[in-house]
Amino acid sequence: MSGGTTTRRPFQTNWLARAGWLLAFLYALYAANLLDISWERFLIGLDNGAKFIGEMVPPNFSRWQLLLGNLIETIEIAIIASAFGVFISLPVGLLAARNLMPAWVTWPFRTFIALCRSFHPVIFAILFVKAVGFGPLAGILTLIFASIGFIGKLFAEAIEEISLKPVEALRATGAPFMSVIVYAVLPQVLNRFIGFSSYQLDANLRNSTMVGIVGAGGIGGTLFSAFQRFDYDFLAAILISIIALVMVSEYISTQVKKVFQ
């Protein structure tokens, strides 16, 4: 206190927030104990992991023809699923945008997008494998739904953030609905839509390796078989190939984005 005035701290202590963090920390300790998570198990896991990695070296590329065939199938699944997913997501995202459509139109499509996002791709893959059998078709259908759930949501949100002045200007001239979409809406969201699509292609390449584990085509089935046979050197070759595939896809998507910027 100086000159009869009280100095206040610039940042007041939030005891409620501190209590919340303390409770969260205590609950984390309780949950770790409940789930039998211990330091001993972690150290044992490190030792087992070191032995596992040691058995993966050096990678075995002797079955490169099988590896190449599975990689090509994985790429085909990802490209086909991404193409159909993007094609379907475009109208779905438009119809789900609340600033362009009435509520009775947007709610069914937003519900459809939510359903596509409700399950992990592996769950969809199990359902489609049961419906259409083992093979790439199940993987393609799985990734189409995953693509709609991701791109449809982001595209609808991007449309809801656009400036409505061009839309209102075209509507004032009596332009039809499709002209409003093509000349007032799409130019504002095209770059973002291309970015969403390229990211989804990357995601589908990764997910196509995962859904193959349950029989939905691609290299995932070969990966799972290598695990079951303890064929770890061939497993390392598969993992290296998947990493290389994703890196090449990332490079291509980056170049595509530069073209449209």
Image: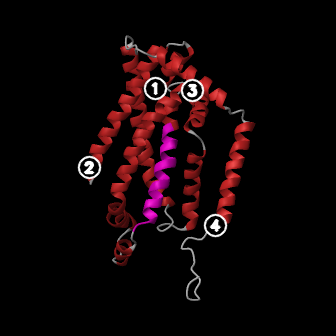
* C-alpha separation, residue under disc 2 versus residue under disc 4: 46 Å
Secondary structure category for the residue under label 2: helix
Amino acid on which the number 1 mark rests in the picture: Gly
Pointer 4: what residue?
14
Amino acid on which the number 3 mark rests in the picture: Val
Q: Give the range drawn in magenta.
A: 143-162
- Residue 228 horizontal side relative to residue 156, left or right: right
Amino acid on which the number 2 mark rests in the picture: Lys
Q: Which of 82 and 235 is in front in this view?
A: 235
- In the image, residue 71 lies at what x, y percent? 39, 24
Judged by depth in the image, the label closer to the viewer, 2 or 4, is 4
Chosen colour scheme: secondary structure
Crowdedness near tag 4: few (<14), some (14–19) or many (≥20) residues, C-alpha within 10 Å: few
* C-alpha separation, residue under disc 3 versus residue under disc 1: 10 Å
Pointer 2: what residue?
258
Q: Can residue 215 be seen in this view?
A: no
- In the image, residue 252 lies at what x, y percent? 30, 39
- In the image, residue 54 lies at what x, y percent? 47, 16
- Residue 73 horizontal side relative to residue 20, left or right: left
Secondary structure category for the residue under label 4: loop
In the image, residue 69 sits, relative to residue 99, either above or below, namely above
Pointer 1: what residue?
218
Crowdedness near tag 2: few (<14), some (14–19) or many (≥20) residues, C-alpha within 10 Å: few
Is 154 covered by the magenta stretch? yes
Secondary structure category for the residue under label 1: loop
Crowdedness near tag 1: few (<14), some (14–19) or many (≥20) residues, C-alpha within 10 Å: many
